[in-house]
Image: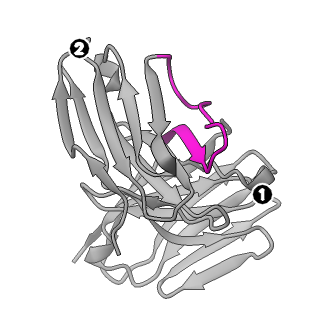
């Protein structure tokens, strides 16, 4: 499978700060880029997703920035809260014929200090 | 409504034993996926079922791994002759065909002694 590189591996932010997680991909056929949030003992849950026809998508405090030419996308968490402490995974996938098998980054462990 | 459920939540087994992990997807979801998550690692795709189509088994790491999906609903992942490197959290997810969002279960933590 094509690799999706995610950084940083871990991130510590103060409450109210901005958390930024970056991902880079190689396969230009990818056309769907979701971010998942995973709390300990739980399965990942979709947080926000973007397609390459837009450069930015915002949902509340969460924003995805997408740079198609650089094959990079990032997650920004504004006004980070202790409740945002979790592991975040980026993913990328393509949908030939309706099939959808994403490739995941290795995850970023985010800790937001009160 | 009910989400994706998995059982057991934890499984401890001895090396060489067979194990079966169960996934109950969200009702009506036609697609079902199995992933493996090792400590500190991302999600490794194992197998994908879509409706009545032949499953995509391209992610299965060896022929000790197999999966079935009966009646387009419940799925069982079987690992034969377990090895210590099989220790991981096994996650199941389901989705509608035309919707990209995957809904994950809580996972089964497998420990092979």
Crowding at label 1, few (<14), some or many (≥20) Cα neighbours within 10 Å? few
- Determine whether the residue tagged by mark 2 lies in a helix, strand or loop: loop
Do the residues at pointers 2 and 1 share their chain? Answer: no
Q: Residue furthest front?
A: B71
Question: Is A93 above or below relative to A18?
Answer: above
Q: Is residue A89 visible?
A: yes
Is A95 positioned to the left or the right of B20 in the image?
A: right
Q: Position of residue B4 (x, y in %)?
A: 37, 59
Q: Which residue is mark 1?
A: A70
Q: Position of residue A101 (x, y in %)?
A: 63, 48
Q: Quadrant of residue B96?
A: bottom right
Question: Is A15 above or below relative to B102?
Answer: below
- Residue at image position (33%, 42%) is B22
Q: Quadrant of residue A23?
A: bottom right
Q: Nearer the viewer, residue A7 or A101?
A: A101
Q: Is residue B39 visible?
A: no
Q: How has the structure been colored for display?
A: one colour
Q: Chain of mark 1?
A: A
- Residue at image position (56%, 78%) is A63
Q: Chain of mark 2?
A: B
Q: Which residues are magenta?
A: B43-63
Query: Magenta part mainly helix, strand or loop?
Result: loop
* Residue B51 inside the magenta-drawn segment: yes
* Residue A76 inside the magenta-drawn segment: no
Question: Is B110 above or below relative to A92?
Answer: above
Q: Which residue is mark 2?
A: B15
Label 2–label 1 contact, CB within 8 A: no
Q: Residue furthest bottom?
A: A60
């Amino acid at each position: 499978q094509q690799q999706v590189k995610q950084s940083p591996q871990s991130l510590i932010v103060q409450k109210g700060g901005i958390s930024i997680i970056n991902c880079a991909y190689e396969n230009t056929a990818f056309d769907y880029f979701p971010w998942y949030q995973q709390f300990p003992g739980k399965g990942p849950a979709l947080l926000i997703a973007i397609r390459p026809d837009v450069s930015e998508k915002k949902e509340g405090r969460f924003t995805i920035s997408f740079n198609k030419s650089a094959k990079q996308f990032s997650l920004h968490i504004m006004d980070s809260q202790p409740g945002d402490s979790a592991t975040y995974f980026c993913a990328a996938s393509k949908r030939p014929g309706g099939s959808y098998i994403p490739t995941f980054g290795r995850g970023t462990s985010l800790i937001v200090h009160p | 409504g009910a989400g994706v459920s998995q059982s057991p939540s934890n499984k401890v087994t001895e090396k060489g034993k067979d194990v079966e992990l169960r996934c109950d997807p969200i009702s009506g979801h036609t697609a079902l996926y199995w992933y493996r998550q090792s400590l500190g690692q991302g999600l490794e795709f194992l197998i994908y079922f879509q409706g009545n189509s032949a499953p995509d088994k391209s992610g299965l790491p060896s022929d000790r791994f197999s999966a079935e999906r009966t009646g387009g609903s419940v799925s069982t992942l079987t690992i034969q002759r377990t090895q210590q490197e099989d220790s991981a959290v096994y996650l199941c997810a389901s989705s509608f065909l035309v919707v990209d969002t995957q809904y994950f279960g809580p996972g089964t933590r497998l420990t092979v002694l």
